[in-house]
Each structure stands twice: as structure tokens, then as C-alpha cells.
């Protein structure tokens, strides 16, 4: 059968907030640059008070936020509450607790003997004006998880939400503005890729991009041209490995949720399953049972599990990926019965050969290839065989075995006996390897991405010459060697032999040459 479904329906329902033109970008950056100075000068404690007000407002308006996400993105409101609103609240609380310490200047002294006079201060400074470009699949949580730490760190932010979910970005900004964040410190530029491209090429200081590999590559090139840093959170094709000792029912429940929640449109969803041959048939049967019971939006039930794809073009791509697999000998399986118009029915691809597109490309929708493997080694090799490296999951009752497999997977995060949740743990740095991107969001590293260091190295003395300055003299080689003996000699005796000449090197009053 061809997997072509009835056309998917875009769920974008809110009136789009005003769309920016490329020409609006320079003026927005200029306003942000002026506003950023005062925002930085405010200090972290004052900024944190405003972010705390935002957190409280988000809690108060949580139902409204979840409803908007559901309307604009198409997922169930209950799912939006758990995966977006609750996670955004977690992230705000986490960064409010972390920021005062992490952003404080760090003072240190060097262990290098010749540097005993130096006093070193490493300040954590904001980049300045940063761009946050986000996708539509988690249209509130993903931008919130970058905008909040960027603001706490003292940056001004220009946010470009996805053109498919503009109202979610607008509501995030509205909540922050209402909490007291100045409108020029956080600006929203609505629009499509042209506005995003103009933003990346503008006088911006850093770009935080979340989206596809193809767009991320363009963003990375543009940033490299200007030597500005960027954090790239890109697509993935996350493998799930189901070992022969896994609780097959548990694995099927988790993988069904991971793959088919959010309409199958999650960056860290399991997108390929490698199952030990001895449990393959049981696992497939357990998956079929669960998929059969999923409620599709529009099928007449009060609540639903799986909504429509956000763009019709995704349906075409998914169907082509599925058809390619069946042309190569795979079997496609869908739940019996008719499917509501506009929804791509959850589809399992069974016994898929390795070269199939569904195993080599990202599949962004409810399509799941399941592959039979001989053993752990084959599963690991196949799991690592794509250009992607976002996250992965391992399912086994033997946690030591699962951890050993995890250590061999090329993935930014590996989850054992669970799936997908990595972007929802505030404390965990989220990001990929290989084509899945560079840089990290969330966790302490997510806040560190929002600052750059300015180090000041100060000297206790204002006029004693440094050990390595000119004035070498005839025995400078002997003094240098004495210094190395004292600093690194293998025994006390070797070190003591260097003391007297080293003292001459370290204590050199300034005198006219
Ligand atoms: P996309 O790359 O099409 O668009 C992402 C954003 O980039 C949008 O706001 C878009 O308008 C903008 N954009 C488009 N062209 C641009 C350009 N030339 N310069 C600058 N900005 C541009 O991605 P999408 O379809 O919105 O999102 C789905 C993809 O995002 C999937 O591949 C998914 O795996 C990935 N994703 C990754 C993560 C992660 O954390 N790694 C999270 C969510 C989604």
C-alpha cells in the first residue's frame, strides 16, 4: 500500500502577530543595543526579581498558555501542560537558583610558581544582543529555555519564533514584558526564514538556533563568516535499543509515547528501534496493541492522543519515506479502521533494511521503523550509523549492561528504560553530537552559553620585574633551569637545588636598564 495520507491540515489558528520585514532587523538590533547597557547595569539580583515575577505569572496563566500551544501547534492541551508549561516553570526556577552563583566573578590564583604574585578575576559577561530563533514543535518551552537564561545573564534578546507558531512566541514575550522586562530588552520579530536569515546576518553578538539540520548549517555558515558564536540545536534520528532482557511491555509503552506524542514531531523522539531477535515478535505485537488504542484527533472522541502534522508537506515526506522502505521489502502496519482526515495515521515499518530512507534520514511524524538485530554489538553499530547524534534510549532489565551500551552510543544524551524526556529535565545539558548540532541548552551549560568571560590578571606588585622579562644576563639559562627544577623536580633534593637561583629570578626590583 502507498502510505500517502489525506492531506495534513495546518493547525495554526491564532491571528498571526504583525510580521516583520527584513528591513526592520537593523533598527531592532540598534534599540536592543542601547537597552542592553542599562539591563546589564541593573545586576543579576534585580533581573532575577523580574524573572521571578514572570515565573509567577506563567504559573497563574498556565491554562491559557497550554490552550494557546494546543491551538497553534496541534498537540493536546494536557500534553502542552506537562511538556511545555511545567518544563518552562522548572527551567525558570532552575536558572533563578543558579544565576547568582554562576554569574558571579570567579577569583583564582595560579598554581604556577612564577605567577605567585598574580590575582586573577574571571567575570562572566553577557554577549550583548543575542538572537533566539526557534521552531514550532515546542513553541513555548524551547524559546523560554533560552530566553530566560539569556536575559538573566544580562543580554538583550531578539526572538524570532517559528512562522507556524507566532502567537506562542508573542505570549512568552508578553509575560516577560508584563513582569517588567523592558520591551527593547526583549523584542519579537515575527516572520519566516527570510527574517531569520536577516537576523543572523545582522549586527548580532550570538545566535541561539533550534531547528533543522539544513537551516542550522546555513546559520552556522553565516555566523562563521562574522566570527560570532552560535549554539545549534538541530534534528535527530534517535535510536532506541531494546535488549533481549528488556521488559518488552514497558519498552513498548515508552516508545509508543516517545514516538507518537506531539504528533510524532519531537526532536528527541525515538525514530528507529533496534530490537533483539529473540524478543522482536513480542515487541512488535506489544507496539501494535498500543498503537491500535491511540486516539487520533478528529476521530470523534472527547480527548485525543495524536494530532495532525503541522504542515501538509511533512505528510508527503513521511509517505515517501514509508513507501521507500516498503519498496525495499519492509512491511508497513497501521491500526485497522478509518483515519480522520488530516491526520497521518501512526505507522510501524517492520523488518526495514538498513539503506531505507526512514533509517538514514530524520522522520518527523508518526512513522516508526523497527529493525531486528542479532545482539548488542549490531544494535550499537546500526544506532551509530547515521549522521545524527541527538539522543538515544536503551531498554534492558540489566542496568549495568544498559549503561555499558549507553557509553558506546554517539548521542548527546542517552536515557535508560525511558525515552525523550532529556529536553524536559532543567538540570540536564541538552544538545547533540555530529550533525545534531553544537552547543548546549538547559542545565548550567545553557547559562554558560549566555555569557563570555572577561579575565583580569592583576599583580600584587606594581613595579617588580617579572621572572621572564628581559634582563636575561649571562646566567639566565642556569636560572631558568633552576626554576624548572624547583617547580617540577622529581624529588625534594632536586627541587631544593633550584631554590637560590629561582629567588633571584622571582624577586627582581625594577631598575633603569
Ligand atoms: P526549520 O529549520 O525549518 O526552522 C526553524 C526556525 O528557523 C524557524 O523559526 C524558521 O523560520 C527559521 N529559519 C528558516 N530559515 C532560516 C534561515 N535561513 N536563517 C535563519 N533562520 C531560518 O525547523 P522547523 O521545521 O521549524 O523545526 C523542526 C526541526 O527542528 C526538526 O529537524 C527537529 O528535529 C528540530 N528540532 C531540534 C531541537 C533540538 O533541541 N535539537 C528541538 C526542536 C526541534
Image (spheres, rainbow, N blue to C red):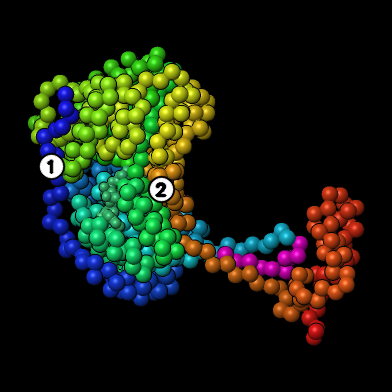
Total numbered circles: 2
Q: Nearer the viewer, residue 272 or 387?
A: 387
Which residue shows up at 48% across the image and 66% down it?
A: 125
Write the start and end of the magenta stretch as one range.
Answer: 113-122
The quadrant holding residue 265 is top left
Q: Which mark is residue 9?
A: 1
State whether residue 73 appears in this view. Answer: yes
Where does label 2 land, which residue? 437
Quick check: is the Cβ at mark 2 less than 8 Å away from ligand 1? yes
Q: Nearer the viewer, residue 497 or 385?
A: 385
In this rendering, the answer to whether 253 lies above or below 309 is above
From the top left corner, tell me how far across and down residue 309 is, in percent.
Answer: 19, 40
In the picture, measured across the screen, residue 370 lies left or right of residue 433, that is left
- Element class at badge 2: strand
In the picture, measured across the screen, residue 198 lies left or right of residue 96, that is left
Which residue shows up at 30% across the image and 33% down it?
A: 357
From the top left corner, tell me how far across and down residue 116 is, in percent.
Answer: 74, 65
**Mark 2 and mark 1: Cα distance apart in space:** 30 Å
From the top left corner, tell me how far across and down residue 259 is, in percent.
Answer: 29, 33
Determine crowd level at label 2: few under 14, some 14-19, many 20+ residues with C-alpha closer than 10 A: many
Q: Which mark is residue 120?
A: none
Q: Earlier in the sequence, mark 2 or mark 1?
A: 1
- For discs 2 and 1, the disc positioned in front in the rendered view: 2
In this rendering, the answer to whether 165 lies above or below 150 is above
Which residue shows up at 75% across the image and 73% down it?
A: 469
In this rendering, the answer to whether 87 lies above or below 357 is below
Q: Nearer the viewer, residue 345 or 64?
A: 345
- Element class at badge 1: loop
In the picture, measured across the screen, residue 261 lies left or right of residue 204, that is left
From the top left corner, tell me how far across and down residue 439 is, in percent.
Answer: 44, 51
Amino acid at each position: 500500500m502507498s502510505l500517502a495520507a489525506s492531506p495534513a491540515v495546518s493547525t495554526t489558528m491564532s491571528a498571526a502577530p504583525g510580521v516583520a520585514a527584513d528591513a526592520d532587523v537593523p533598527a531592532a538590533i540598534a534599540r536592543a543595543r542601547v537597552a542592553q547597557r542599562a539591563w546589564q547595569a541593573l545586576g543579576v539580583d534585580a533581573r532575577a526579581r523580574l524573572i521571578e515575577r514572570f515565573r509567577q505569572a506563567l504559573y497563574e496563566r498556565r491554562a491559557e498558555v497550554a490552550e494557546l500551544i494546543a491551538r497553534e501547534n496541534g498537540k493536546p492541551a494536557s500534553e502542552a501542560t506537562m511538556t511545555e508549561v511545567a518544563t518552562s516553570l522548572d527551567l525558570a526556577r532552575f536558572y533563578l537558583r543558579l544565576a547568582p552563583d554562576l554569574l558571579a566573578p570567579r577569583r583564582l590564583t595560579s598554581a604556577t610558581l612564577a605567577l605567585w604574585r598574580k590575582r586573577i578575576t574571571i567575570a562572566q559577561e553577557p554577549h550583548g544582543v543575542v538572537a533566539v530563533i526557534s521552531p514550532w514543535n515546542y513553541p513555548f518551552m524551547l524559546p523560554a529555555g533560552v530566553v530566560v537564561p539569556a536575559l538573566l545573564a544580562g543580554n538583550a534578546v531578539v526572538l524570532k519564533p517559528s512562522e507556524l507558531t507566532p502567537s506562542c512566541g508573542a505570549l512568552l514575550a508578553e509575560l516577560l514584558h508584563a513582569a517588567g522586562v523592558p520591551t527593547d530588552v526583549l523584542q519579537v520579530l515575527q516572520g519566516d526564514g527570510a527574517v531569520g536569515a536577516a537576523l543572523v546576518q545582522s549586527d548580532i553578538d550570538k545566535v541561539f538556533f533550534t531547528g533543522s539540520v539544513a537551516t542550522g548549517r546555513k546559520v552556522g555558515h553565516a555566523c562563521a563568516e562574522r566570527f560570532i558564536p552560535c549554539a545549534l540545536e538541530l534534528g535527530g534520528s534517535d535510536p532506541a535499543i531494546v535488549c533481549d532482557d528488556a521488559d518488552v511491555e514497558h519498552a513498548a509503552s515508552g516508545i509508543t509515547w516517545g514516538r507518537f506524542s506531539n504528533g510524532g514531531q519531537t526532536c528527541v523522539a525515538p525514530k528507529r528501534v533496534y530490537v533483539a531477535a529473540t524478543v522482536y515478535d513480542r515487541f512488535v505485537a506489544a507496539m501494535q496493541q498500543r498503537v491500535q488504542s491511540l486516539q487520533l484527533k478528529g476521530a470523534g472522541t472527547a480527548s485525543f492522543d495524536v494530532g495532525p502534522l503541522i504542515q501538509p508537506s511533512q505528510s508527503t515526506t513521511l509517505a515517501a519515506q514509508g513507501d521507500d522502505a516498503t519498496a525495499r521489502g519492509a512491511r508497513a502496519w497501521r491500526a485497522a479502521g478509518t483515519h480522520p482526515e488530516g491526520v497521518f495515521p501512526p505507522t510501524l515499518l517492520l523488518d526495514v533494511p538498513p539503506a531505507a530512507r526512514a533509517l538514514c534520514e530524520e522522520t518527523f511524524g508518526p512513522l516508526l521503523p523497527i529493525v531486528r538485530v542479532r545482539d548488542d554489538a549490531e544494535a550499537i553499530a546500526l544506532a551509530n550509523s547515521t549522521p545524527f547524534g541527538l539522543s538515544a534510549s536503551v531498554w534492558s532489565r540489566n542496568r549495568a549492561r544498559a549503561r555499558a551500551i549507553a557509553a558506546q552510543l554517539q548521542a548527546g544524551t542517552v536515557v535508560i528504560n525511558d525515552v525523550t524526556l532529556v529536553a524536559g529535565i532543567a538540570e540536564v545539558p541538552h544538545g547533540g553530537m555530529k550533525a545534531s548540532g553544537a552547543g548546549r541548552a538547559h542545565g548550567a551549560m545553557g547559562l554558560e552559553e549566555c555569557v563570555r568571560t572577561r579575565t583580569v590578571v592583576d599583580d600584587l606588585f606594581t613595579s617588580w620585574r617579572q621572572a621572564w622579562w628581559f634582563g636575561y644576563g649571562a646566567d639566565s639559562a642556569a636560572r631558568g633551569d633552576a626554576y624548572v627544577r624547583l617547580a617540577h623536580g622529581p624529588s625534594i633534593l632536586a627541587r631544593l637545588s633550584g631554590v637560590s637561583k629561582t629567588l633571584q629570578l622571582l624577586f627582581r626590583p625594577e631598575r633603569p636598564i
